[in-house]
């Protein structure tokens, strides 16, 4: 960050410790810093989305720093661009990641546009990522704190937004961030990191979904078509899930746990298998759509690495991309519970190249799974 710059930076203030320290770092570097608190969800009577408390935490920090704090309501934009997508994907039997869309559409979309109207030259957030700007173009890099790296969630942010973005804590460790917050007298120095999705908060996932979508119970069967029980609705389950199946030990079967291997919307059937490493939980490859690249897209046949979910290690793969923006990844080693609706994100070392939405996978085994439709279909 250039020192003593008079240029204005609008920091997305979430009320958390990361954005608070980001604002402090920018102020120390000499920027004209303003904070902006985004309300992205309607206040709920049960208080699961802690927007009011988060705003008070942001106010306390900005007061300590002596910087203005703006507050804006993006709830309508969030519902139209993120939440509607979330519901559509759930209804389609997939497991969406709305945080990726929130970054692309709201934090680096609507928020950026609003910040420009406030006179901003740059925007900043408390994400654990880095950017650099070599002659070849802007690059998105992993945060130095690998345990907190959030590049996965920024894989779809347009490169023009990244050109105007600053990530002040991308080269810091979380412990250092908390230490600075404590030294500066921020009340949120020990605040728990937010997890999950804001519009669900701490409430039970099923309780939240049932207020928006009708659940359709159906059969739970094993790969041979044996009826094992009933599910509450396919939208409540994701591939690789172990908890909440309600089938326990079954006569004639081993005592090992059951896991979700497949969801068939047509027959409304949940297929489960026994054992954490059952072959039907593994895939050799995947197909993804809506590929978005930060700069030049990868070349066909490129040897890269990919994550198919957050907090996963990078896995070596080969990529093939078509003219419509769809791509296929073939992995060196089979991957467990690759889930349609999640994002496949590509990396070249520490550089995040972009990604796309997982559409389908190729099972590790060529066997077929009985889907209680009177025939055997591919997974």
Image (tube, helix red, strand yellow):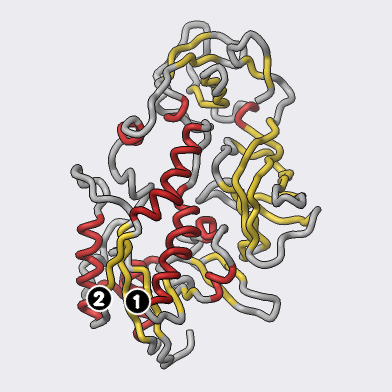
- Left or right position of 264 against 231: right
The CA span between labels 2 and 1 is 8 Å
Q: Dividing the picture into quarters, in which one does residue 106 lie?
A: bottom left
Residue 329 is labelled as none
- Residue 279 location in percent, x, y? 65, 27
Looking at the image, do the residues carrying marks 2 and 1 touch, with CB atoms under 8 Å apart? yes
* Outermost residue to the top: 252
- Residue 272 location in percent, x, y? 53, 21
Q: Secondary structure at mark 1?
A: helix
Work out whether residue 173 can be spotted. no
- Residue 34 lies, with reference to residue 41, above or below; the image says below
Disc 1 residue crowd, few under 14, some 14–19, many 20+, Cα 10 Å: many
Q: Earlier in the sequence, mark 2 or mark 1?
A: 1
Which residue carries the number 2 mark? 62
Work out whether residue 197 can be spotted. yes
- Residue 74 lies, with reference to residue 25, above or below; the image says above
- Residue 90 lies, with reference to residue 260, above or below; the image says below
- Residue 166 location in percent, x, y? 47, 75
- Left or right position of 69 against 82: left
Disc 2 residue crowd, few under 14, some 14–19, many 20+, Cα 10 Å: many
- Left or right position of 272 against 188: right
In percent of the image, x 37 and y 73: which residue is there? 11
Which residue carries the number 1 mark? 23
In percent of the image, x 66 and y 67: which residue is there? 295
């Amino acid at each position: 960050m250039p020192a003593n710059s008079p240029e204005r930076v609008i920091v997305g203030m979430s009320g958390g410790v990361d954005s608070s320290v980001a604002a402090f770092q920018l102020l120390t570097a000499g920027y004209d810093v303003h904070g902006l608190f985004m309300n992205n969800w309607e206040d709920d009577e049960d208080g699961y989305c802690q927007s009011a408390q988060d705003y008070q935490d942001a106010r306390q920090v900005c007061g300590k720093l002596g910087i203005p704090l703006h507050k804006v309501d993006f709830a309508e934009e969030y519902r139209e661009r993120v939440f509607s997508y979330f519901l559509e994907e759930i209804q389609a039997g997939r497991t969406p990641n709305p945080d990726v869309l929130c970054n692309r559409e709201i934090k680096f979309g609507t928020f950026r546009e609003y910040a420009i109207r406030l006179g901003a030259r740059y925007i900043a957030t408390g994400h654990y990522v880095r950017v650099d700007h070599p002659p070849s173009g802007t690059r998105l890099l992993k945060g130095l704190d690998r345990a907190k790296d959030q590049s996965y969630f920024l894989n779809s942010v347009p490169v023009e937004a990244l050109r105007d973005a600053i990530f002040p804590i991308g080269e810091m460790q979380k412990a250092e961030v908390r230490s600075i917050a404590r030294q500066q007298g921020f009340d949120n120095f020990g605040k728990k990191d937010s997890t999950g999705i804001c519009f669900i908060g701490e409430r039970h996932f099923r309780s939240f979904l049932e207020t928006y979508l009708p659940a359709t119970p159906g059969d739970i069967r094993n790969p041979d078509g044996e009826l094992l029980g009933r599910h509450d609705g396919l939208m409540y389950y994701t591939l690789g899930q172990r908890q909440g199946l309600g089938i326990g030990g079954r006569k004639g079967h081993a005592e090992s746990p059951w896991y979700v291997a497949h969801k068939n919307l047509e027959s409304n059937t949940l297929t489960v298998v026994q054992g954490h490493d059952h072959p039907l939980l593994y895939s050799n490859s995947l197909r993804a759509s809506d590929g978005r690249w930060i700069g030049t897209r990868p070349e066909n046949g490129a040897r890269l690495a990919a994550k198919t979910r957050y907090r996963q290690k990078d896995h070596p793969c080969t990529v093939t991309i078509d003219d419509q923006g769809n791509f296929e990844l073939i992995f060196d080693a089979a991957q467990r519970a690759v889930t349609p609706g999640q994002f496949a994100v590509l990396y070249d070392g520490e550089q995040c190249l972009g990604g796309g939405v997982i559409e389908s996978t190729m099972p590790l085994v060529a066997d077929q799974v009985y889907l209680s439709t009177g025939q055997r279909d591919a997974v």
